[in-house]
Image (cartoon, rainbow, N blue to C red):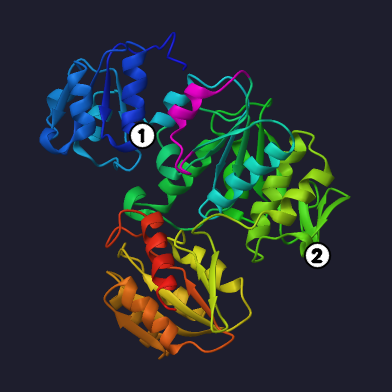
Amino acid sequence: MKILSNFPYQKVLVLGLAKSGEAAAQLLLDSQVPFRINDLTKLEDNEIAQKFNSEGVEVITGSHPFEVLDGIDLVIKNPGIPYDHVIVEEAIRRNIPVITEIELSYYLIDGPIIAITGSNGKTTTTTLTYELLKAGGLDPLIAGNIGKVATNVARQQKDKQPVVMELSSFQLKAIEDFKPDIGVLINITEAHLDYHKTMDDYVSSKLNITKHQSQDDVLIYNADDDIIKDGIKQSEAQLTPFSVSGLNQHGLYVSEGTIYERQDPIVKREDIALPGDHNLENVLVGIAIAKRFAISNQKIKSVLKTFTGVKHRLQYVDTINDRQIFNDSKATNIQATLKAINAFNQPIVLIAGGLDRGVEFDELIQSFKNVKGCIAYGQSADKMCEAAIRQDFHSIYKVDNLQKATNKAYEISERGDIILFSPACASWDQFKSFEERGDMFIQLVHKLY
């Protein structure tokens, strides 16, 4: 496995463990780069910290004293640790660079990097791109926010293997030199303001994907998104637009049910297996990347005819008594849930709720054209019900947890309805992750028989 060479830092602090922190620490250890670990979980309850402690690594757990920064010239933090964290603020005050392990992986990757970000659709687009490149015989790797720690993937990369990376705003905010050969901006809508504090900070973090790109690099961007169009004006990359509306025909676009690259027809909408028109953005990006690698239209169409999406992203679960049931646990914001709702013409019974991030849900309720009922659960349930009252929507039911929500949704549904679990909220009030939440929903559906 690869190790770091010509690494410019003398002593590193790994702040926060979990998967990315453990991967960064293991790479530093294998590369014989001096480092220490600081993690809030106490040593006796912290198996990862215990492992590195047994290897002779300096480990400080249970608190975050400023002394952990003494002698440090680089901080590698867990992406989820916010910038108002005491150690991060102190590191910045001391002019110590703060990065995530995404930046660390950049020291190892030798070959094309395709980096994909957006408020919605990242995982589907990343996975589709991986499948398209694989069909083209390119032996790609997949990494990043999709659950594959980039550092671990980079260590296994063979010469010139393409690496397809899904990147969050948390990861992109903390880059120093990282730049992709092909960067992608799918869309930008309001999200994660509990972390970023302002929309400007969130947008600038997303735009970091092209911050260091040169004229030798490519940026694929959504020409229908005004925030993106305004934000990329300073990009030095070669710009490739895509447009679902068909207004920009200089790149990939949709017109009269067919996807084109400039004037070249690629595939008809009816031949694409992914449900929902919102997924056309993801398809356009995947095709644009495939074309950069000279993958034929025939191979592209073959993948699109069989690729049905990713688990927890508008995932078909089952049909019970003529009710189709879908798991969209990855929908952690209102815009994602709106796209899920708009993917169907049939009447919908919606299950939504989760962590209260301080947002109001009027925009969601206003869009309930084909939503006949909504089951609200979790920390945000009261706010959803209050928004429903304001919007004169009366078919809303508040329950305590996902089990009760699933049972209630089935109870009020009728033959021909869609039961859609699309929470519009993060999972962390009752679950560790959206994956755990989605898996629980699938289990609950199977108990409806």
Depth order, front residue of 43/40: 43
Q: Quadrant of residue 213?
A: top right
Side (left or right) of 301 relative to 102 = right
Report which residue position mark 2 lands on: 257
**Callout 1: SS:** helix
**Callout 2: SS:** loop
Please name the residue shown 81% across and 55% down the image.
267
Q: Quadrant of residue 212?
A: top right
How far apart marks 2 and 1 lie (CA) works out to 42 Å
Please name the residue shown 13% across and 33% down the image.
43
Q: For label 2, count other residues whose C-alpha is less than 10 Å away and answer few (under 14), some (14-19) or many (20+).
A: few
Q: For label 1, count other residues whose C-alpha is less than 10 Å away and answer few (under 14), some (14-19) or many (20+).
A: many
Report which residue position mark 1 lands on: 20
Q: Could you tell me residue 275's position as x and y percent? A: 65, 65
Looking at the image, tell me whether mark 2 or mark 1 is earlier in sequence order.
1
Q: Could you tell me residue 148's position as x and y percent? A: 46, 38
Q: Is residue 101 above or below residue 324?
A: above
Q: Is residue 383 magenta?
A: no
Q: Is residue 156 magenta?
A: yes
Side (left or right) of 67 relative to 96 = left
Residues at circles 2 and 1 in contact by the CB criterion of under 8 Å? no
Depth order, front residue of 89/290: 290
Q: Could you tell me residue 217's position as x and y percent? A: 66, 29
Q: Is residue 176 visible?
A: no
Mark 2: which amino acid? Gly
Part of the protein shown in magenta = 144-159
